[in-house]
Amino acid sequence: MEIVNRVQHYRKQANLTQEKLAQLAHVSRKTINSLEHGHYTPSLLLALQISKILNLDINVIFSIKE
């Protein structure tokens, strides 16, 4: 199983840069970049923070691919 995320799509839709999303989520821009490119699986806390920042349900942004 793997986690599929749509962070980049919704970040851009919200007109946020990687840097701004990182600041709001209290992580580095590198973390957001790695997340968007599938090189990093977020903790539950980070996934919830991102969904709150983007004002979207967590299931819209993240899903499990079997």
Image: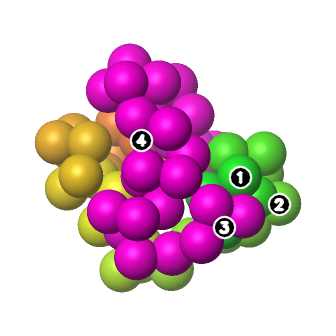
Q: Which residues are magenta?
A: 1-30
Left/right placement of residue 63 relative to residue 58 reads right
Which residue in the protein does label 3 denote? 31
Quadrant that contains the N terminus:
bottom right
Which amino acid type corresponds to the residue marked 4 in the rendered image? Ile
Mark 1 near mark 3, Cβ–Cβ under 8 Å? yes
Viewer-side label of 3, 2 = 3
Query: In front: 23, or 34?
Result: 23
- Whichever of labels 3 and 4 marks the residue nearer the N terminus, that label is 3
Q: In whole angstroms, how far apart are the C-alphas of marks 4 and 2? A: 16 Å
Q: Which residue is mark 4?
A: 61
Residue extending furthest toward the top: 13
Task: Inspect the image, locate mark 3, and give the three-letter code of the amino acid beneath it.
Answer: Thr
* Distance CA(mark 1)–CA(mark 3): 5 Å
For the question of whether residue 60 can be seen, the reply is yes
Query: Residue 48's image quarter?
Result: bottom left
**x and y percent of residue 50 in the render?**
35, 57
Asked whether residue 24 is drawn in magenta, I would say yes
